[in-house]
Amino acid sequence: MSTNSAGRSLSTSTDSLLRLAIRLDATGTGLLGLAATAFAHSLSRLSGLTLTQIYISAVAFVLYGIVGNLLAARPLIRRIGTGLSAFNFVGTAAAFVIVASAILPLTGAGTAIVLGCGAYTMFFGLLQLVGVRRLPALG
């Protein structure tokens, strides 16, 4: 039977959902960043964003992919999960503000992409929050 570093069975671990949510979020975000880099020119024409905006977003996505996966392996995960969940909710709000304020010259497809990213961050923010709430109470 597989065990984690604390000697508990993975199937009985109370932090497995949170770790999985963080890893899925980080890996998916990192892969989106790599895809954005590979298709930056097409994505720029499709979305209305400049190449610089695409590349900056892509680098941030890849960095989050790396950092998120490293954080998911930390032994104490409650604060990490809470912080990443909040970070995702801020990302969701930012996506809606960007679209509603028309601060960026988005095309229809660009608007759909930004709102899709907002839905993605909302989903993982909620999943991470559920994972945090499943952890035993402190003290």
Image (cartoon, rainbow, N blue to C red):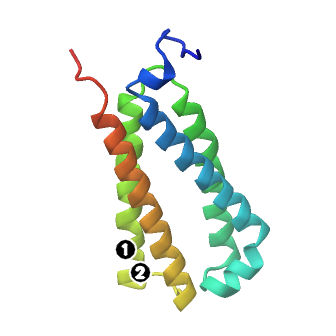
Q: Which mark is residue 88?
A: none
Q: Position of residue 127 (x, y in %)?
A: 38, 48
Residue 99: assigned label = 2
Residue 46 drawn above or below residue 75: below
Question: For the point 39% across and 37% down, which residue is it?
Answer: 81
Q: Amino acid at mark 2?
A: Val
On the picture, is 90 further left or further right than 10?
left
- Do the residues under discs 1 and 2 have CB atoms within 8 angstroms? yes
Q: Judge by depth and name the residue closer to the eye, 25 or 71.
A: 25
91 is higher (above) or lower (below) than 71: below
Q: Dot 1 lies on which element?
A: helix
Q: Is residue 38 left or right of residue 102?
A: right
Which amino acid, by three-letter code, is at mark 1?
Phe
Q: Nearer the viewer, residue 59 or 136?
A: 136
The residue positioned 74% from the left and 65% from the top of the image is: 37
State the residue position of label 1. Answer: 96
**Where does the C terminus fall, quadrant-wise?**
top left
Give the residue at the far bottom of this rendering: 108
Answer with the quarter of the image where residue 15 lies.
top left
Q: Quadrant of the N terminus?
A: top right
- Residue 89 location, x and y as percent? 35, 56
For the point 59% across and 17% down, the residue is 2
- Label 2 residue SS: helix
